[in-house]
Amino acid sequence: MGLNKKSVDDINVAGKKVLCRCDFNVPLKEGKITDENRLVAALPTIKKLIADGGKVILCSHLGKPKGEPKPELSLAPVAKRLSELLGQEVKFAADNEVVGPNAKAAVEAMKDGEVILLENTRYRKEETKNGEAFSKDLASLCDVFVNDAFGTAHRAHCSNVGVAQLVDTAVVGYLMQKEIDFLGNAVENPVRPFVAILGGAKVADKLNVIDNLLDKCDTLIIGGGMAYTFLKAQGNEIGTSLVDDSKVDYCKEMIAKAEKQGKQLLLPVDAVTIKEFPNPIDAPVEIEVCDSSAMPADRQGCDIGPKTQALFADAVKSAKTVVWNGPMGVFENPTLAEGTIAVAKALAETDATTIIGGGDSAAAVNTLGFGDKMSHISTGGGASLEFLEGKELPGVAAANDK
């Protein structure tokens, strides 16, 4: 996987028209942005392009308008908020066809250091199919392309891959660079010992990740709902716990693979069990802790128990690199969040490089207040999973090599 990509630091865009693909896919409520983390995260790259004296043309998708204009998914509120965050006007180019008369006129009139924002790229039905017409429209606006949207890097769309192939200079922004440095290199070239922690509900979602990480890591820790299929594969009674019977053989293969390669594969030794799943998810529950080898037939495991918390935390202590993807239990319920909190704490206290692979684990770490203790929290759920699978991400591949 070629991870040595040209970044915004390798070029100077003075006097050039730069199209910068950002991830402005922010949550909106009645036209108000309820979480602006993604806008704030994009500022360093945008400021660098402004400081160079580039003509900065920003683009992003928002939600799923499915190829037609949906006023409630317009990026107009983002332009307004970005103007405030940057302290200079971000002109909004309101075109339902994204690259329309408004956008073209605005780009023509730009002075160096000015910024405009195009309308939601997914207003165009070609966007998600990487159709040539829209890629050409986007490329017609710019001399240089910068991709800073890791969240969509695992998809080949017009605004991240199609346009990159039509522009001579295509580089990555600071956010993408950080993802490549941390996630990409952790998997391809880790400082050892390398410990990978996988959680989440389903084995099926992580088949390739488990397989790839067993090749790369020294210790693989498995928690969350998917651990019960592994425990069943070892011949344990797992009660009414979540299980994927079609994957029991796969789990047996992975246990054998770990043994053959001399890798440590750690599974829960005890479980926090409940009678029935909480409804609503944060409702009070009565818990009972049992050894993994002796779970009552009428109870289900919904978190790792105290012995497992200590076992997993201990495995992290001597690590130099730790990657974590997926919670250890039903962390949305305060009673069933202890295992996830214990892992987050262990990562917060280690000197290792700690990388949180997007999705629920990123949400958990941030919600629990450990965000600033991690070396890197990935901004993309699906994209970070594919990185951990060892797949080449089209959005990364499309950028020029150094």
Image (tube, grey):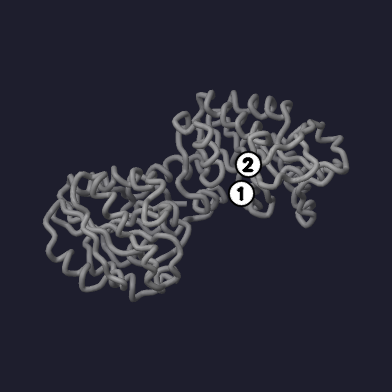
Provide the residue designation for mark 2.
198
Secondary structure beneath disc 1? helix
Instruction: Pick whichever of labels 2 and 1 is earlier in the sequence.
Output: 2
Q: Residue at x 45, y 40 (%)?
A: 182
Toward the viewer: 111 or 300?
Answer: 300
Q: Residue at x 30, y 72 (%)?
A: 136
Q: Amino acid at mark 1?
A: Val
Secondary structure beneath disc 2? strand
Q: Is residue 267 left or right of residue 359?
A: right
Toward the viewer: 142 or 393?
Answer: 142
Q: Is residue 217 left or right of residue 387?
A: right
Q: Are marks 2 and 1 in contact (CB under 8 Å)?
A: yes
User: Is residue 100 in view from this perspective?
Assistant: yes
Provide the residue designation for mark 1.
209
Toward the viewer: 62 or 12?
Answer: 62
Q: Position of residue 183 (x, y in %)?
A: 48, 43
Toward the viewer: 5 or 127?
Answer: 127
Q: Position of residue 83 (x, y in %)?
A: 23, 49
